Amino acid sequence: MSKTIRFNAFEMNCVGHQSPGLWAHPRDRSWQYKDLDYWTDLARVLERGIFDAIFIADVIGYYDVYKGSNYHALHQAAQIPVNDPLQLAAPIAMATEHLGIGITASTTFEHPYTFARRLSTADHHTKGRLAWNIVTSYLESGAKNVGDHGLRMHDDRYAVAAEYVEVLYKLFEGSWEDGAVVRDRDGRVFTHPEKVHEIGHKGRFFDVPGYHLCEPSPQRTPVLFQAGASGPGKAFAAQHAECVFVAAPTRDQLARYVADVRAQAAAAGRDPAKVLIYNLVTVIVDETDEKAQAKFDEYRRYVSYDGSLVFMSGWTGIDFGQYAPTDPVRRVETNAIVSAVEHLSGGDTAWTIEALAAWGGIGGMGPVFVGSASTVADILQEWVAATDVDGFNLAYAVAHETFEDVVRHLVPELQRRGVYPTAYAPGTLREKLFGGSARLPDEHPAAQFRDIEQVKRAAEREAVSA
C-alpha cells in the first residue's frame, strides 16, 4: 500500500520568500504580505487543498554577506522588509477551521519566559492549531542588533536551544496542573492556587523561577517543528521535534537524512514513525507537461541573479559576490547553516556560481518539480518510496498562483490515487497529525516535567551532592 503524502505551505511574512525577483511577475501577490487579506485568502486555498499547515518561516536580521552589504537584499526585497509571523496566527485561524499554523521563532533572540506566554496565547486563539518551528538563527546581523557582540558558534546555539525548550516544557507542562482552573461561579473560585507551581529553573543560560502566566492551552505545548539538518540539528530534531523540515535537493541526500533522524529518534526512546519529515519542494503544475514547462520558463525570466546569491550567501555564510560567475563552489568553514554548505560542496553536483544562482532562483535549496498533475504525482510518489519522507513543504514561485495550481491540479490527482487525504481529522493540530491526545506523548522529553515539584526536588538533591 502506498504511503500517504502530506503537504505544508512554506511561506514567510515578507516579499520574495524563496524565489527572489518573482515579486515583479504581473500575477504575483507577495508584495501584499502586509495585508491580512493576503493571508486569509491563502489560508482558505490551503484548507481547500487539505494542507496540514501553513509553515511560516522567519529571520531576525538581514542578508548582508553578499558583497559585504545588505544593498542587494533591499534592492530585490530578499526577505526584507519582513514582518512578525506570530501575529498572523489569529487571523488565519479565524478564516479557517482546520489548517495548522506553524510559526518560526528563534531560541537565540527572545527570552523563553515571555515567549511562552505568546505561544500559549496563540494556541488558545487558534483552538489548538499552533505549531512552533524551533530555529537557532544564522544571521550575524540579528545578533548584533539585539545587543550581542556576535552570533554564538553553531553548536553552542543548540546548547542554548536545549535549555530553552526545557524552560518552555516546565512552563507549559508543569506549572499548571490539570484541574487547576475550575471557573466555579458558585464557590467563587477561578483557580486553585495550590495547583499552580513555580518552575524553579536555574540553568547555564536562563534563570526562570516563577509561574507560567497562562492557563493551559488546548495542546499545552504547541506541535514542535524543527528545521536543522546539521549533525547537532538532527540530534536536536530526533530528541524533540514532532515534525521536521529539511531542504534536501536530491533523493539520496533526503533518504540518508530521513534514515538518520528516525534512527536517532528510536535511540532516544521515541516512536520514529511519529516523527513526520517534510522536504522542501517547489511544484510547477498545469494541465499538461508542456503548459507547466512554459509556465516555469516564464517564471525563470523574473529570477534575480543578485537576489539568488543574496540568499545563498546568507544561508552558507560564504560571500559568493567575491567570485566570478564561472568559479566553482568550494567547501569552507562557516558559522551559518552548516547543512547548506554540506549540500552544495559535498553533494552530487559540481556547482559554479552562476549555476548556483540559476538553480536557487526558484524554490531556494529544494528541488523543483515541473509537469502535469500525473507527472508530478509520479515524482512525489517515487521520492516517498525511495526516501520514506512523510510529505513536502511546498514553496511558491508566484503567490498565490503556485498554491492554487497545486490545489486545482495536483491534489485531486493524488486523491484519485488514494495517497492524499480527502478530509481533515477532528481535534487539535496534534490530533489531526498523529491521532490520540492533544498532549505530547509520554515518551517525549517534555513529559518528565509534568510533576514539576518532583523535578525541583531532584534538582535540589543534585545540587547538594555536587
Image (cartoon, rainbow, N blue to C red):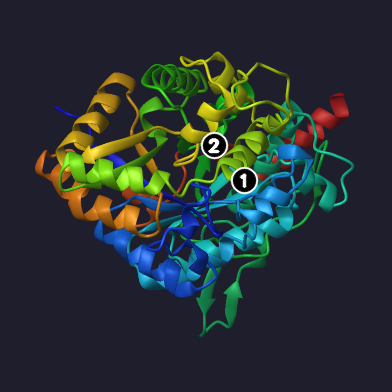
SS state under label 2? loop
Image marks 1 and 2: residues in contact by CB distance under 8 Å:
no
Q: Vertically, is 74 above or below 108?
A: below
Q: Vertically, is 332 above or below 161?
A: above
SS state under label 1? helix
Q: Vertically, is 45 above or below 317?
A: below
Which percent across, then down, holds residue 271?
Answer: 40, 27
Total count of labels: 2
Residue under the image location 62 percent in, 20 percent down: 327
Residue under the image location 11 percent in, 38 percent down: 417
Residue 345 visible somewhere in the drawing: yes
Residue 7 visible somewhere in the drawing: no
State the quadrant of the C terminus. top right
Which percent across, then down, holds residue 300?
Answer: 41, 44
Q: Closer to the camera, 180 or 134?
A: 134
Residue farthest along the left direction in this orientation: 416
Q: Nearer the viewer, mark 1 or mark 2?
A: 2
State the quadrant of the N terminus. top left
| Residue beneath disc 2 | 227
Point out which mark residue 267 bears: none
Few, some or many residues within 10 Å of mark 2 (<14, 14–19, 20+): many
| Residue beneath disc 1 | 169
Q: Closer to the camera, 14 or 239?
A: 14
